[in-house]
Image (spheres, helix red, strand yellow):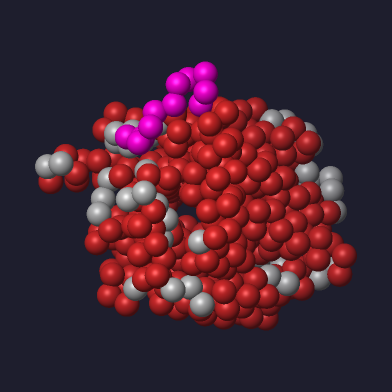
Amino acid sequence: MSQQHGTRQIVSWALYDWANSAYAVVIMTVFAPLVFKDYWAAELVPLESSKYWGTANSIASLIVAAIAPILGAIADRGGAKKRFLFLFAFLGIVMSGALQFVAQGSWGLALLLFVLATIGFSGSISFYDSLIGSITTEKKVDYVSAFGYALGYLGGGLLFALCVLMVKWYESFGFVSTDAAVRFSFFLVALWWLVFSIPLLIWVKEPPVKVAAAKGNMIILGFRQLAHTFREIRNLRVVFLFLIGYWLYIDGVDTIVRMASVYGKDLGFSNNVLIEAILVTQFVGFPAAILYGKLGERIGPKAGIMIAIAVYIGVVFWGYRMDTEGEFYVLAIVIGLVQGGIQSLSRSLYTRIIPADKAAEFFGFYNMLGKFAAVIGPAMMGWVGALTGDPRNSILSILILFVAGAACLYFVDVEEGKRIARELERV
């Protein structure tokens, strides 16, 4: 592979992060939860609407968690990683655009479309992640993984900034109200996601499979391979232990991403503060993700993840005691410094310890555990807040996930995992 061709594939792959991060920040993290509480579900008690929002996030994650490993197995056997990626992306794009047509008070329909859009978003990420091993070398995987997340922060942040400007000065953009501007942003997300997915479709090649399956046998062989991988992961101590730790600590990370706006809203912070703080997170996250990739190259991905977990533990305590809007801004900056880092280094560490020829299937398990974690976290926050009547208790409840995740990660022997993975590739 020529250097030029390799660089083009890396950039094209990373642009999918630029594309889908628009959904992650504009819809999933900010506008959808705020619109849900203020517009679609305005008649509900605030803590009750938070409970429904958290439950909807959990349902979407549960569905993706259930199907990701099976689809990953099929994709590995049939050489269909890109096909499944764009199938899920199409679902997410269409449902994102459809959110703009949901009328006030129709919170049930809003939740349905949001769940479907999130399934499309999360499902596509599983196959996107599985392509990283085919576009770069082990030496550069930390940097390439971080580069993808960095572009995601920048791309999502740029579109989010445009949407914020539209909402603040809606009349100058030709809208009759802030609600109209916010709902138009859902269409912009769908368009952005669609356009910037095209480079991956054109220039990133489908990785070859050792033994191509006939179309009629793809599903049967996929299920057989899934069962085989269950046995493999159970016997691969390093992979198994990492996945348990990842499942725990990424629960806290994803829950903070999905519930930050709702939590701030329940504390009484204004929409402007919540929007501006999350915008700050995006632009801090862009350079921080790249620097964290360099940190991973220098000290190793495991040590980098441990540092990020320690920061998140501090974030939980800070969030529990937080009283002012100024503190929310500071918290947003701190999260931006480590959010992309913990995600990118987790992906690159996992890439090192799994067989490259089974990447989609193994990443199916990786994303399955990530989504099962997100099944627990948002619902736990929503229900703890509703049952205790105090939203502060909800964020404190996720502390145990970071502590337990770090404990598991401590015993992961990365070098042993790399050695075993390379041996399996030669079989």
The residue lying at 28 percent from left, 58 percent from top is 138
Q: How many marks?
A: 0
Q: Main secondary structure of the magenta part?
A: loop
Q: Is residue 419 visible?
A: yes
The residue lying at 72 percent from left, 45 percent from top is 59
Q: Which residues are magenta?
A: 208-218
* Magenta stretch holds residue 372: no
Specify the farthest residue to the top.
Answer: 216
Would residue 124 appear left or right of 261 to someone viewing this image? left
Specify the farthest residue to the front.
Answer: 427
In the rendered view, would you say 91 is above or below 363?
Answer: above
| Viewer-proximal residue among 165 and 155 | 155
| Viewer-proximal residue among 299 and 153 | 299
For the N terminus, the image quarter is top left
The residue lying at 34 percent from left, 73 percent from top is 300
In the rendered view, would you say 350 is above or below 321?
Answer: above
Would residue 110 appear left or right of 304 to someone viewing this image? right
Q: Where residue 360 appears, x then y in whole percent?
A: 45, 43
In the rendered view, would you say 240 is above or below 24?
Answer: below
| Viewer-proximal residue among 336 and 211 | 211
The residue lying at 25 percent from left, 54 percent from top is 137
Q: Where residue 69 appears, x then y in whole percent?
A: 57, 43
| Viewer-proximal residue among 103 and 143 | 143
Q: Where residue 5 appears, x then y in whole percent?
A: 16, 39
Q: Is residue 177 visible?
A: no
Residue 94: image quadrant is top right
* Magenta stretch holds residue 212: yes
